[in-house]
Image (cartoon, grey):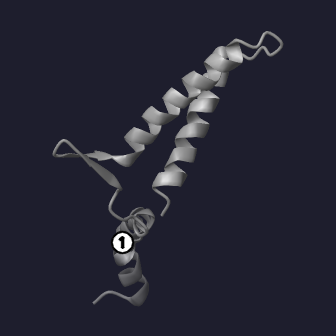
Amino acid sequence: MLSASAQIIHLLPTMRRIVLVLALCLPLIACTQAPTVPMFGAFFPGWLFCIGAGIIAALLIQAWLARRPAVWLPPLVTFLTLASLFSFLFWLLFFKP
């Protein structure tokens, strides 16, 4: 028969595994089904349309800003910032939880 401290030491790897599994499952608690958009008989994720619309909006705004000679902005930084901004904005407007 094992002593109490030996039993605890024996169970320690099992407890670590249980704690690890619970810690890895914790971020999945709030997950729900992803918003999808039915198109042509297939379901596409909503974020895909938001990114596409964000890129198109960023291209339009960047073209408008490029015609203004008084404003100089680095094109790559401007495009990435605007695309991210509009993608997040479209996500919040159309797929708000």
Residue nearer the viewer, 39 or 31: 39
Residue located 62% across and 31% down the image:
82
Does 59 sit left or right of 48 as displayed? right
- The residue sitting at 50% across, 27% down in the picture is 56
Q: Position of residue 36 (x, y in %)?
A: 31, 52
Q: Residue at point 80% right, 16% down?
A: 71
Asked which quadrant contains residue 31, the reply is: bottom left
Q: Establish if 75 lies above or below 58.
A: above
Mark 1 lies on residue: 18
Q: How many other residues sit within 10 Å of disc 1, few (<14), some (14-19) or many (≥20)?
A: few
Residue 76 shows up from this direction:
no
- In this picture, is 11 found above or below 75? below
Near-viewer residue (3 or 33): 33
In the image, 43: left or right of 88? left
The number of callouts visible is 1
- Point out residue 85 in the picture as x, y percentages from the top left corner: 61, 38
Left or right, 15 with respect to 53, comes to: left
Q: Quadrant of the N terminus?
A: bottom left
Residue 61 lies, with reference to residue 17, above or below; the image says above
* Side (left or right) of 80 relative to 8: right
Say which amino acid is labelled 1. Ile
Q: Is residue 11 visible?
A: yes
Q: Position of residue 84 (x, y in %)?
A: 57, 36
